[in-house]
Image: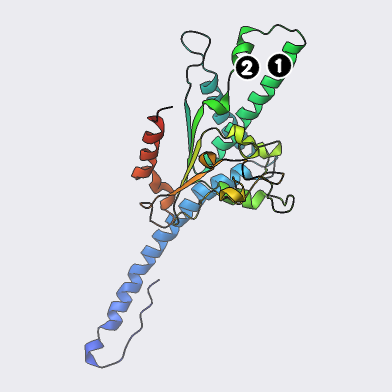
Amino acid sequence: MVYCFQLHLGNPWATLNSVCDSLSVLSWPLLIAVSWYVRKMLVQYVGDVAVYVTSHKLDRFNSLREKIRETVYTAAEAVYKAPAAKGDGFAYDNVFIVGHSLGAVVVYDALNRLINEDELRKRKLHEDELRGRKLHEDELREQKLNVAGRTKLLLTFGSPQDKITFLFARPGPKGTVRVYSYPGSAGAAAQPLVQSAKFRQFKWINIYSNLDILSGRLDFFDSPAQGGSGTGNRPRKPEDIPEPQRVDNRIDEEARTLLAAHIEYWDNLLLYRILREQITKRR
């Protein structure tokens, strides 16, 4: 709204009243437009996250949640398991994972699930070998899947993960915070990406803006000694997540429009500069 304060100082100010009336008339369409835009942003992005992490299994969004999780997981699994054209290796030795907004949450969950399944599979196949069972060719190949090792980058931007962690975390041992857990998330079992440094073998970069109220820095995914707020179900040691593997939070200075900053990352150079640097990096 536009509030006009009128000064009665004689004839020079006689037209101020009509000017204020005109501004008041113009302010209503502007207010409606701004309200519509804010509502659209909140419904589209906050609403998506709320639907994904809601705790009700029997609500009308349950099938949608499951479809989102399974679609992303299945696509990621196909990439990691794709066989090489020749030989017994894999088609992709270097995998780069990128997620925006809710997508950052979904790919994080999918990656945790893939790593968990990879570890369980290797343990089971190893036990079968010890019992003398001969492994099939596909089993031998899957034994070398190495999801954590072949992942070279996790790039999140506009991510609400810290806010979700804050809302869904439960108090753990003194000085620690338990990882977030909601139906279908890796937190229901384990999140290897915060449980051990051996699974954080890749760079995790998070882009955020101070004017993006839906996201922010990711501080709950590293121990306090490494600059984060700490996660996990046990006290964290400083060496748990080494410096190169902890979350690298980078602010996008070009995302500077309140609320709209949440989608401005797509149009700014920082995102693409990071992708180019990481993809072309010698390994």
Residue visible at 44% across and 60% down in the picture: 35
The disc at residue 126 is 1
Instruction: Using residue 111 as the reference point, say whether residue 273 is left or right of it.
Output: left
- The quarter of the rendered structure image containing the N terminus is bottom left
Instruction: Using residue 200 as the reference point, say whether residue 260 is left or right of it.
Output: left
Q: What element carries label 1?
A: helix
Instruction: Using residue 120 as the reference point, say whether residue 251 is left or right of it.
Output: left
Q: Which of 171 and 129 is in front in this view?
A: 129
Residue 228, image x, y percentages: 58, 50
Residue 23, image x, y percentages: 32, 73
- The quarter of the rendered structure image containing the C terminus is top left
Residue visible at 66% across and 49% down in the picture: 168
Quote the CA–CA distance across marks 2 and 1. Answer: 9 Å
In the image, farthest residue toward the front: 239
Residue 123, image x, y percentages: 70, 21
Q: Mark 2 points at which residue?
A: 143
Residue visible at 62% across and 11% down in the picture: 140
Q: Is mark 2 on a helix, strand or loop?
A: loop
Residue 94, image x, y percentages: 47, 25
Q: Do the residues labelled 2 and 1 touch (CB within 8 Å)?
A: yes
Q: Which of 3 and 217 is in front in this view?
A: 217
Q: Which amino acid is tagged 1?
A: His
Label 1 Cα crowd, 10 Å radius (few <14 / some 14-19 / many 20+) = some
Q: Earlier in the sequence, mark 2 or mark 1?
A: 1
